[in-house]
Amino acid sequence: MSRSIGDLALGGVIAYILVEGDPGYDAGFQSGLVATTGDTSTGAACGCYGTLLGATGTTIGTGNQNTVQICANCGTAVHPAKINNINNNPNNFFIFSFFN
């Protein structure tokens, strides 16, 4: 099934479709980024103030590793990455990198 930016999919809206040259691009399989349509982090702080998390990726394709770093190094704090990794499939959710 071919999808377009703006289509509803996987509980959100398609925000980006990978193109040739993007990390993870596969000409035989359409994939991209889906953005939530609502606030999934109500009451959560953004990150762990004062803690170096090691989430330094800025290019397209590094958001997943940034999310892994945040979840691994933020302890028990409640933050968007942890909430979404608990509530959704952690293999499908990650916080966008800077250039996403």
Image (cartoon, rainbow, N blue to C red):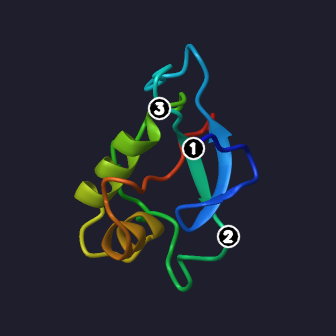
Q: In the rendered structure, which amino acid carries the disc numbered 3?
A: Gly
The residue under label 2 is 37
Q: In the rendered structure, which amino acid carries the disc numbered 1?
A: Met
Residue at figure coordinates x 61%, y 22% from the top left = 19
Q: Quadrant of the N terminus?
A: top right
Q: Quadrant of the C terminus?
A: top right
**64 or 92: nearer the viewer:** 92
Q: Of circles 3 and 1, which is in front?
A: 1
**85 or 7: nearer the viewer:** 7
Residue at figure coordinates x 50%, y 19% from the top left = 27
Asked which secondary structure carries label 1, the reply is loop
Would you call the spot at circle 2 few (<14 residues within 10 Å), some (14-19), or many (20 or more)? few
The residue under label 3 is 61
Residue 81 drawn above or below residue 86: above
Q: Of circles 3 and 2, which is in front?
A: 2
Image coords of residue 85 (percent x, y): 34, 66
Q: Which mark is residue 1?
A: 1
Residue 52 drawn above or below residue 60: below
Image coords of residue 70 (percent x, y): 35, 55
Q: Which mark is residue 87?
A: none
